[in-house]
Image: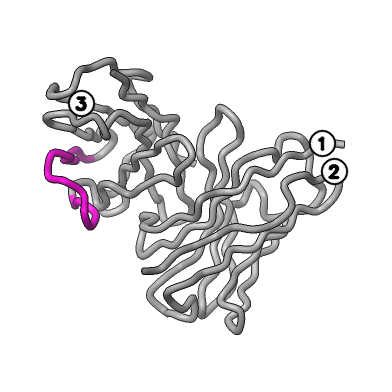
Amino acid sequence: QVQLQESGPGLVKPAQTLSLTCSVSGGSINNDSYYWSWIRQPPGKVLEWLGYVHARGNPYYNVSLQSRLTMSMDKSQNQFSLRLTSVTAADTAVYYCARHLGASFDLWGQGILVTVSS
Amino acid sequence: EIVLTQSPGTLSLSPGETAILSCRASQRVSNKYFAWYQHKPGQPPRLLVFGTLKRATGVPDRFSGSGSGTDFTLTISRLEPEDFALYYCQQFDSTSWTFGQGTKVEV
């Protein structure tokens, strides 16, 4: 079955760039039916959708973060990625990658805790 | 941005009882674009209900969703030990997705 797995550094210094990758196994991300999102949850706070990529078309971002956010797909590696620049402590969160078909997220990665600290 | 407010924050129940979880939206939400998730510690959220009342694959029929407009409900009948968890509601308003703050169902 399709599985998603996040990877990347667990610690990022303030003002630096947070980079994460989601590896997809058991299915292709080059599939018109699905969209691939990043979602995060700061400690004790609400889940926040960050943006998505799709096999056809440009990435789409949460307007509150779009000035710092870049998402991309690597179809040859069956992966998609997130870059968040100029991070602060407020970006400390568990970051999830997730698949959606329509308006709900039917498959999630395990999540990765990223801490922003010097 | 549509804000989702869930109530109660915590629901203390026993196995076999019925849990009724509420989610209120700050603006009207299309039934097509409303969902519920179950979240357990150390695991990713699990989709339970989408399109307000459709159960996701493998979800037992003791989970049922209902509602419309700004008020939505998740009912869990005959609580099983594995149902004690955190539950989130979620909506999509054609520009972005937002989630509620969660209801914890505890023993």
Taking A81 as reference, is A94 above or below it? above
Q: Is residue B58 left or right of residue A18?
A: left
Q: Tell me where the magenta segment starts and ends, as one range.
A: B54-68
Judging depth in this view, the residue of B86 and A56 nearest the camera is: B86
Which of the chains bears the disc numbered 3?
Answer: B
Q: Are marks 2 and 1 in contact (CB under 8 Å)?
A: yes
Mark 3: few, some, or many residues within 10 Å (few <14, many ≥20)? Answer: some
Amino acid type, callout 2: Lys
Q: Which residue is mark 2?
A: A13
B85 is within the stretch colored magenta = no
Q: Which residue is mark 1?
A: A117
For image coordinates 56% across by 77% down, the residue present is A78
Query: Looking at this rendering, what residue extends furthest in the top direction?
Result: B12
For image coordinates 61% across by 74% down, the residue present is A73
Q: Quadrant of the N terminus of chain A?
A: bottom left
Amino acid type, callout 3: Ile
Q: Are marks 1 and 3 in contact (CB under 8 Å)?
A: no
Q: Quadrant of the C terminus of chain A?
A: top right
Q: Can residue A68 be seen in the rendering of this structure?
A: no
- Closest to the camera, between mark 3 and mark 2, is 2
Mark 2: few, some, or many residues within 10 Å (few <14, many ≥20)? Answer: some
Q: Is residue B98 left or right of residue B65?
A: right
Say which element carries label 2.
loop
Mark 1: few, some, or many residues within 10 Å (few <14, many ≥20)? Answer: few
For image coordinates 57% across by 67% down, the residue present is A23
Say which element carries label 1.
loop
Which of the chains bears the disc numbered 1?
Answer: A
- The residues bearing labels 1 and 3 have C-alpha atoms spaced at a distance of 40 Å
